[in-house]
Image (cartoon, helix red, strand yellow):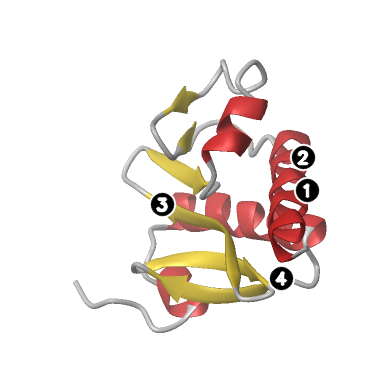
Amino acid sequence: MTVPTSVEDYLAALPEGSREALEELRETIKAAAPEATEAISYGMPAFKDHGRVLVYYAAFKHHYSLFPASKGALESFREELRPYEVGKGTIRFRLDQPVPTALVQRIIKARLEENASRRR
């Protein structure tokens, strides 16, 4: 498999169901962090805030994942994340369920605050 060079390349290579879920997740992240920039990092789409990774996201066969790049963010939202499979650094969402938009937006806002506090 070739490593994508852009987010558009990454999305274009996905099967339709995965692509739709990831596009919705991407739009949710953009809405919460409109000044963030997009990149491919570690072969996955990522959003960066002032050069620092905000989140990664990716599609898999039966789920899509959000990687908040922060143990603190995962810990802060532990109760709200109970319905989802949460790993050491990832939140897995099933492809057959809608993107939990409000939750993702709160996670993105928390990550923006974490990044801002590191810049101070």
Badge 2 vs badge 1, beta-carbon distance below 8 Å: yes
Q: Position of residue 37 (x, y in %)?
A: 66, 76
In front of the other: 51 or 16? 51
How far apart are labels 2 and 4 at the CA level? Answer: 15 Å
Which mark is drawn over residue 109?
Answer: 1
Q: Residue at x 75, y 55 (%)?
A: 117
Tell me where residue 23 sits by quadrant: bottom right
| Amino acid carrying mark 2 in the image | Arg
Point out the tag, 3 or 2, that comes first from the N-terminus. Answer: 3
Residue sitting at the far front: 120
Q: What residue type is disc 4 on?
A: Ala
Q: Which residue is mark 3?
A: 59
Pinpoint residue 64: horizontal percent, then vertical percent: 45, 44
Q: SS of the residue at dot 1?
A: helix
- Tag 4 or tag 1, which sits nearer the N-term? 4
Density class for disc 1 (Cα within 10 Å; few <14, some 14-19, many ≥20) is: some
- Pick the quarter of the image with the N terminus: bottom left
Farthest left residue in view:
1
The residue that mark 4 highlights is: 36
